[in-house]
Amino acid sequence: ELFPGFRAQLSKKADTFFWKGELGLIDGAVVPVMAAETEEADSGGRYQLFVKDAPKACAKAVDELLESRFGTATQALRAAELALNKALFEEAFARNRKRPWSF
């Protein structure tokens, strides 16, 4: 499994599927994420991401992810993992410019 901590569930209220679980990030943080099926298939994808309690360094990435749509739940989760880790890496790199190779 690509994301073993995620489980597919059915929302009875919205009558759609969603995948819910936690992503582990490169700094050791664990972030709750949900990829929900939307009815907006013509908007470029069927899944929308919801990210909760992400580190502050990831705020811009979270905003961009919330605006995006993805073809599959796996694509959505992978995009979240990459975007959040990239934001953390860039923040750490900017903080430690004088000391390359340290995180």
Image (tube, rainbow, N blue to C red):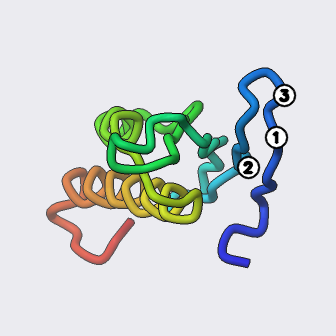
Vertical side of 82 occupied by 100: above or below: below
Residue occupying the far left of the picture: 98
Residue assigned mark 2: 21
**Label 2 vs label 3, nearer the camera:** 3
- 46 left or right of 35 in image: left
Q: Secondary structure at mark 2?
A: strand
Q: Residue at x 64, y 42 (%)?
A: 34
Vertical side of 94 occupied by 64: above or below: above
- The residues tagged by marks 1 and 3 sit, at their Cα atoms, a distance apart of 6 Å
Quarter holding residue 11 = top right
Relative image position of residue 70 (x, y in whole percent): 43, 53
- The residues tagged by marks 2 and 3 sit, at their Cα atoms, a distance apart of 18 Å
Mark linked to residue 50: none
Relative image position of residue 60 (x, y in whole percent): 29, 36
Vertical side of 92 occupied by 34: above or below: above
Q: Residue at x 73, y 46 (%)?
A: 20
Residue assigned mark 3: 12
The mark that comes first in sequence, 2 or 3, is 3
- What amino acid is found at the position of numbered circle 2 in the picture? Gly
